[in-house]
Image (tube, rainbow, N blue to C red):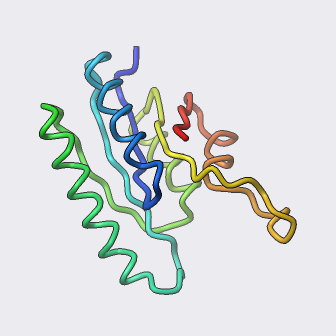
C-alpha cells in the first residue's frame, strides 16, 4: 500500500517513537524509505544545527540498517514544512511519517503554525503524526 515512505527526522523527544513506528511500517509494507533532514534557512546557529542534524541522520540510518532496512538520506536547507512537502512530491511519497513536538499554539505564536500542521495541510499524501 505504501511504496514510498518519507521520514523527516527532527531533534525532539518524540523522534524515537517515530523512528520505531517508521521501521515497522516500512517492514510491513515493504516500502522504500527516504529519511529527510531539513536545516532552516537563516536560522541562528545554522552551522551547529547542520552538524547536529547530520549526526542524527547517521544515527537514523544506522538504526534502520540494524533493522534490515535500507534507507536513502537527503539533506536540504529551507523552510521545513515546504521542503518536506516538496521532497514528498518529488519522490511520489505515499506516506509521510513525522514526529510531533506536542506543543499547541500559544498566544504570542497564534499567527504561526507548526511545521507538522503545515505539512498536514499542504501534503498531497497521507501524513502519520507520532506523538
Residue 16 in percent (x, y) is at 37, 46
Judged from this view, the residue extending furthest toward the top is 1
**Which residue is more in the foreground, 117 or 91?**
117
Q: Give the number of callouts.
A: 0
Quadrant of the image containing the N terminus: top left
**Residue at (49% x, 40% y) in the render:** 89
**Residue at (51% x, 71% y) in the render:** 40
Q: Is residue 34 above or below residue 81?
A: above
Res 119 → quadrant? top right
The answer to whether residue 56 is left or right of residue 15 is left
Q: Is residue 66 above or below residue 9?
A: above
**Residue at (29% x, 31% y) in the render:** 23
Res 19 → quadrant? top left
**Which residue is more in the foreground, 120 or 21?**
21
Q: Is residue 96 above or below residue 49?
A: above
Q: Is residue 45 above or below residue 17?
A: below
**Which residue is more in the foreground, 94 or 22?**
22
Residue 54 in percent (x, y) is at 27, 67
Residue 72 in percent (x, y) is at 23, 45
Residue 60 in percent (x, y) is at 26, 50
Quadrant of the image containing the C terminus: top right
**Residue at (55% x, 37% y) in the render:** 129
**Which residue is more in the foreground, 39 or 124?**
39
The answer to whether residue 47 is left or right of residue 98 is left
Amino acid at each position: 500500500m505504501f511504496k514510498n515512505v518519507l521520514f523527516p527526522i527532527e531533534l525532539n523527544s518524540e523522534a524515537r517513537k517515530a523512528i520505531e513506528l517508521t521501521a515497522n511500517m516500512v517492514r510491513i509494507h515493504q516500502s522504500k524509505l527516504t529519511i529527510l533532514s531539513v536545516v532552516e534557512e537563516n536560522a541562528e546557529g545554522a552551522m551547529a544545527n547542520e552538524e547536529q542534524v547530520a549526526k542524527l541522520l547517521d544515527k537514523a540510518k544506522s538504526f534502520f540498517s540494524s533493522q534490515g532496512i535500507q534507507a536513502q538520506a537527503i539533506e536540504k536547507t529551507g523552510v521545513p514544512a515546504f521542503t518536506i512537502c516538496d521532497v514528498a512530491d518529488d519522490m511520489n511519497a505515499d506516506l509521510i511519517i513525522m514526529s510531533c513536538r506536542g506543543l499547541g499554539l500559544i498566544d504570542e505564536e497564534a499567527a504561526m503554525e507548526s511545521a507538522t500542521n503545515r505539512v498536514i495541510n499542504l501534503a498531497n499524501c497521507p501524513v502519520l503524526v507520532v506523538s
